[in-house]
Image (cartoon, rainbow, N blue to C red):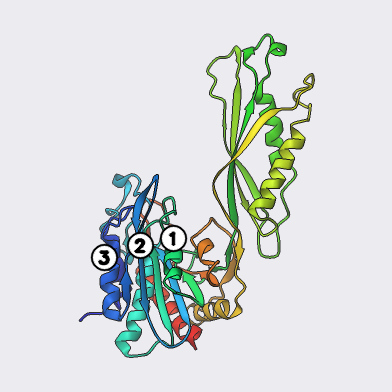
Amino acid sequence: MTLPIDPAANLATLIRCPSVTPAEGGALSALEAMLAPLGFAVERPVFSEAGTPDVENLYARRSGNGPHLMFAGHTDVVPVGDEGSWTHPPFSAAVHKGEMYGRGAVDMKGGIACFVAAVARRVADGRPIRGSVSLLITGDEEGPSINGTGKLLEWATAKGERWDAAIVGEPTNPQQLGDMIKIGRRGSISGVITVHGRQGHVAYPDLADNPARGLITLAEALLSPALDAGTRDFQPSNLEITSIDIGNPATNVIPARATAAFNIRFNDTWTPETLQAEIHNRLDRASKRGKFRPDRQEPIGFDLTWRDRPSEVFLTRDDKLIEALSESIRAVTGRTPGLSTSGGTSDARFIKDHCPVVEFGLVGKTMHMVDERVALADLETLTDIYSRFLDDWFA
Ligand SMILES: [Zn+2]
């Protein structure tokens, strides 16, 4: 029986499964085939919800006497983009000059391949793990994230599963392996403002009410003043207007309606609720401003709708977990990783409700790009770091 001790071989197997969300693509079957000989009990629940595609997920547990560590991640990948622009086909796992090419190489089949190899090497060497290890792997991280990690956690919890800590294998390092552990993430909310005016002739503005004037006033209130100045652990919260739409082709018509969409990445100054209240207050106050509507008595007529589910901010304060991982990274790379809360949201936002969670994986430079690739040397190094972490955290 050959055990999956070689991270590059594991990764090549996974890359060759075209698992673009929501397709399983053979990736979870391949992973199950690696985990079963290592003593993992593997289950693959499929979750559904109206309006979204069904998604298959994987939960594997190797039981031992002691604390329970979860490794979390995803086997789904983003689309390849322009396939012709790839130097090597995106599902070929071609190796060239010490790098393996393929969609998912770093985000994040590579992280999974290394963690599996780390466990496999211990099993192959007959070195026991002093506790339980689980892999919680979704096929719905790059998509709507509705039939993925959140439901998988609920499903496992309902079966009685409890964890003491989790590590997510997302590519957290900006430049070099060992740069950065993520110990938290900012939250995210999105909204759309629609300003209602009255259509008319541009030469007779007093007979109309141009919603563009109102929209500019409201947009200004969103952008200024700054939401906060940042906190000890987080950069300042930031609002970006992502679209401004009127869609009026005529040069002589005042439009009836104008909309603006925005997204806020927010820090631990806020909860989604307090931030939404702040935005409502700003808009209500601004709607009475006459700056761009000097002769109007009535306030700007608008409505605000919140889009999607908000993502909450989180910060992990588990010294044992952070220290064990930092020490493993130092021991293997000689580098002291920064503890960061930067970047987008990740599935750690679901896990934080169940146990302390940190994120550490490969170098993210090429994620989601054409020619996504990973240095074979990095696969070995990350496997060593995960191995060492298995020693240190269970010790
Ligand atoms: Zn990812």
Q: Are marks 3 and 2 in contact (CB under 8 Å)?
A: no
Q: Is residue 61 left or right of residue 340?
A: left
Please report whichever mark, 1 or 3, sits nearer to the chain's N-terminal start.
3
Q: Nearer the viewer, residue 222 or 49?
A: 49
Q: Amino acid at mark 1?
A: Lys
Disc number at residue 29? 3
Q: Are marks 1 and 3 in contact (CB under 8 Å)?
A: no
Q: Are marks 1 and 2 in contact (CB under 8 Å)?
A: yes
Whether 306 is drawn above or below 313: the answer is above
Whether 125 is drawn above or below 203: the answer is below
| Residue 19 lies in quadrant | bottom left
Disc number at residue 256? none
| Residue 156 lies in quadrant | bottom left
Secondary structure at badge 1 equals helix
Q: Residue furthest left?
A: 1
Residue at screen point 44% across, 69% down: 158
Q: Is residue 46 visible?
A: yes
Whether 201 is drawn above or below 150: the answer is above
Q: Residues within 10 Å of mark 3 (few under 14, many from 20)?
A: some
Q: Mark 1 to mark 2: distance in Å?
A: 10 Å
Secondary structure at badge 3 equals helix
Residue at screen point 55% across, 67% down: 352
Residue at screen point 67% across, 14% down: 208
Q: Is residue 92 left or right of residue 255?
A: left
Give the foreground label among 1 and 2: 1
Look at mark 1 in the image and give the residue it sits on: 151
Look at mark 2 in the image and give the residue it sits on: 57
Please report whichever mark, 1 or 2, sits nearer to the chain's N-terminal start.
2
What is the x, y in percent for residue 255? 60, 19
Q: Residues within 10 Å of mark 2 (few under 14, many from 20)?
A: many
Q: Mark 3 to mark 2: distance in Å?
A: 10 Å
